[in-house]
Image (cartoon, rainbow, N blue to C red):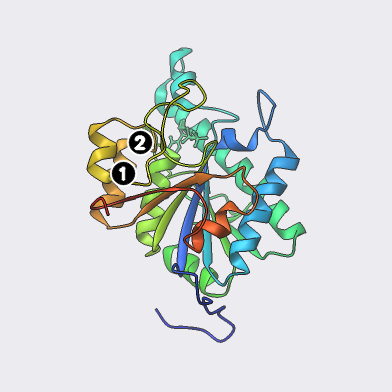
Amino acid sequence: MGETAGTPEPQTGTRYKRVLLKVSGEALMGQRDYGLDPEVVGRVAREVKAVIELGVQVSLVIGGGNIFRGVKGAAGGMERASADYIGMLATVMNALSMQSALERMGVSTRVQSAIPMASVCEPYIRRRAIRHMEKGRVVIFAAGTGNPFFTTDTAAALRASEMGCDALLKGTQVDGVYTADPKKVKDATRYETLSYLEVLSKDLQVMDASAIALARENHIPILVFSIHTPGAFAEVMQGRGKYTIITEERE
Ligand code: UDP
């Protein structure tokens, strides 16, 4: 991959050149029961901007669970594939909201959808996405993998692999992976490091199993951190702050 004139050079202290951040749709809901809280979307956009300013190339996958989840639709009697398509369309709405928040902050972005919708955004084209990132644009991958029976976690691991990302970031409600849900279990402790296999064998609910397997196969570390802690994304990129790193071996 060639460097281009104007490509932001990673500064010292930043160990990652290109990353993908996965944020669930629910993380953008704030205190609401449904949909988006523009204030929260703005806060997440600021986190992304801070990392772009470090010279790191950033791409995003945003879930759709704040609007629609296929499994729920199927449980209500809808055909699963149709329900999943609705879920994928929900991720496009979230992607467009995030694009608009980022552009209001002066961050150049492109939305690429796995389901082509020419008048709304670009179709997913791998080489073009890489080119955008090389130019310092944030690429938001919408519509998941484009296939029913998948999740946006898997889409995130897939796109991170295709883009040759150095890390897959998962921005969650808490600052890493815990032995139990820290909101329910008082003495739950946070893991500093985990191996992919431990995540799978302990059935830790970080990302779904196919996403973990894909990241493992492609040797992409997964860093889990709190998307709600101001400045956390940039800190994690510099190896600081609180997070859990999932790699091949426990360090
Ligand atoms: N979805 C899908 N294929 C994909 C990605 C997503 O069918 O590749 C559908 C699926 O129905 C899912 C919904 O889109 O429930 C929303 O995505 P997800 O549940 O992953 O969102 P998140 O939990 O991250 O907000």
Disc 1, SS: helix
Question: Mark 2 touching mark 1, by CB under 8 A?
Answer: yes
Tag of residue 208: 2
Assess disc 1: are there few (<14), some (14-19) or many (≥20) residues with their C-alpha within 10 Å of its C-alpha: many
Location of residue 89 in the rendering, given as x and y in whole percent from the top left corner:
55, 38
The residue that appears at 29% across and 38% down in the rendered structure is: 199
Residue neighbourhood size for the residue with mark 2, other residues' Cα within 10 Å, grouped as few (<14), some (14–19), many (≥20): some
User: At 36% from the left edge and 51% from the top edge, which residue is drawn?
Assistant: 158
Q: Position of residue 5 (x, y in %)?
A: 56, 87
Q: Amino acid at mark 2?
A: Asp
Look at the picture and state if 183 lies above or below 95. above
The image quadrant of residue 28 is top right
- Choose between 164 and 110: the one closer to the eye: 164
Q: Position of residue 109 (x, y in %)?
A: 63, 62
Q: Position of residue 176 (x, y in %)?
A: 45, 41
Q: For mark 1, what is the residue?
A: 212
State yes or no: Cβ of the residue under disc 1 lies below 8 Å from any atom of ligand 1.
Answer: no
- Quarter of the N terminus within the rendering: bottom left
Q: With respect to residue 58, does 210 lie above or below?
A: above
Q: Residue at x 35, y 58 (%)?
A: 161
Report the front residue among 185 and 146.
Answer: 185
Which residue is located at x 72 percent, y 36 percent?
37
In the rendered view, tell whether residue 127 sits above or below residue 244.
Answer: below
How far apart marks 2 and 1 lie (CA) works out to 7 Å
Q: Amino acid at mark 1?
A: Ile
In this picture, residue 213 sits left or right of residue 225:
left
